[in-house]
Image (cartoon, rainbow, N blue to C red):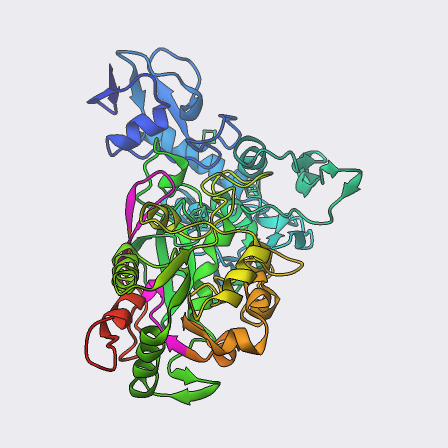
Amino acid sequence: MAKIFVDGTEFEVDEKKNLIDALKEKGVEIPHFCYHSKLSVVGMCRICLIEIEGVPKFQAACNTPIKDGMKINAFGEKIVKAREGVMEFLLINHPLDCPVCDKAGECRLQNYSFALGHETTRYKEEKRNIPQEKIGTNLLINHNRCILCYRCVRFDREIVGVNDLEMLARGNDTIIAYTPPETSGEKSTYLNHNYQGALADICPVGALLNENTLFQSRVWWYESQESHCHGCSTLCKVSTNVKNNSLYRYMPTAAAPQSGEISDGIFICDYGRFSGKHFSTDRLHHYVATGAQATSKQVLPDLAEKIAAARSILVLGGATECTDDVDSVAAAIGEWRAAGKQVKWDFRSTAAAFENRAGYDFLLSGDLRPNAKYLRDKGATELTNFVALQSEIRNVDLVIVINELSAPYAYQIAGADEHSAHVAGLEIAAAVEETQLFKTIEGEAAWVKTAVFTTHHNSAALRAALAVPVLAFPEHEGRYVDKNGVTKTTTAVLKPVQGLQSVGQVLSRLKTPVGATV
Ligand code: SF4
Ligand code: SF4
Ligand code: FES
């Protein structure tokens, strides 16, 4: 530890840390644009200038090693004046766009401009005017707003691991450009990795923008709560952005520790970030019996009868549900087995479960079902071979599918994985029929003996003998066990329609015709 003095106040700080982080931990915020605790230091923006006693020139705080006894002038008159000058330079080409900029309300440049800048500009010359450009499948760049802090370039190189952004030209003409890496001789037109939202987050101004949320809401209209992303078994810590009972997006949590693990919510992937939107559309809010709207009084006794009559049952899925619901599924299966039935429980995991995806992906788990680990621990099997699954379906008396055929849980979409669908803003509910599981159950005889628990109103709900509507995860609090075995909680952020219950609650309501719990 080192003792340093900031404007006369003594602080004991960890000298191994960056000065900006060390002081932030003590409640002293040195302004910074280009510095980020997870990226290399470049000292590009100069807004973090400080004066150090005994050093003739102002220094960039982000690039100053901590030394015991160091005396810093961080907010004195001279240094504030210097930062005003830096702000003036940074704003020379920056348009007066806040009223029409998606970043307004969560923009570092806007905040510092209010805190450190001038009210008026002395710059009378013409500002540069470069047209906005699409550089990613879900990413736009507004060159005029860019302050050339180099964060985006470093993020892609150092965190995502791809060298696809570059600073081109010189002086007033300098821009950030997409420079496609060559993969097997082919160049992609757009940046297409799973962290385009993180690029927009890390950009300290409104230069990088997510296309699929553009102009959908002012950020101060969102209600936010701490939660965990349900998108995969990494279960990143997130902040929810809800408006009109719709989960627009997740954001990295403001409470993410500077020195924490990346999955502590410092960065999140696009797949997870935009996955919540699908829980506000195409929802199933009533029971269905052979394609027709029905009531719980019709469907639940029918389902209980089917269970009572079946000698063999195949339960598919459950890893999308919280631990309480998985416990209820496990308990029901235990009772069915105790009653002499042959029950197989399979959650169709992939062999790559718990491992990060290949290529440019450092967070997204190979298993997109958040509670996959817990299901394994509960004894569910991992049948990934669809030919074998087809024969299982053919041979059992009853198939119960738990949310595996609900959008957005229908993962194996032909031609595009769900991540691409999310990034492209596609409606994936319609793609359920393209999933391997749907095709595996295909055939009238198979559907007649199939009951689905589902969050979504789709062709699976209409084709199955019985469909039971259930709560989606943002509608109830739930615990999940991540790929490393850590229990995490998701928060109820959406209001469900009255009477909608979780899978576990529905199972506990099921009674056999003679009144015994099944
Ligand atoms: S686009 Fe944003 S992150 Fe990239 S250099 Fe410009 S201001 Fe920095
Ligand atoms: S890595 Fe998984 S948990 Fe994290 S944001 Fe992406 S989908 Fe969500
Ligand atoms: S934050 Fe130090 S130079 Fe940009």
> x and y percent of residue 43 in the render?
50, 26
Visible residue check, residue 149? no
> x and y percent of residue 256 in the render?
33, 41
Magenta segment, which residues?
A: 467-488
Visible residue check, residue 363? yes
Q: Does 483 lie within the magenta span?
A: yes
Q: Residue furthest right?
A: 185
Q: Does 163 lie within the magenta span?
A: no
Q: Quadrant of the N terminus?
A: top left
**Quarter of image, res 177:** top right
Check the image and report above or below for 210 versus 92: below
> x and y percent of residue 377 in the render?
32, 45
> x and y percent of residue 517 in the render?
21, 72
Q: Quadrant of the C terminus?
A: bottom left
Q: How many marks?
A: 0
Residue drawn at x 58%, y 72% is 430
Residue drawn at x 39%, y 12% is 55
Residue drawn at x 34%, y 30% is 259
Front-most of residues 465 and 430: 465
Front-most of residues 182 and 356: 356
Q: Left or right of 152: which side holds 483?
A: left
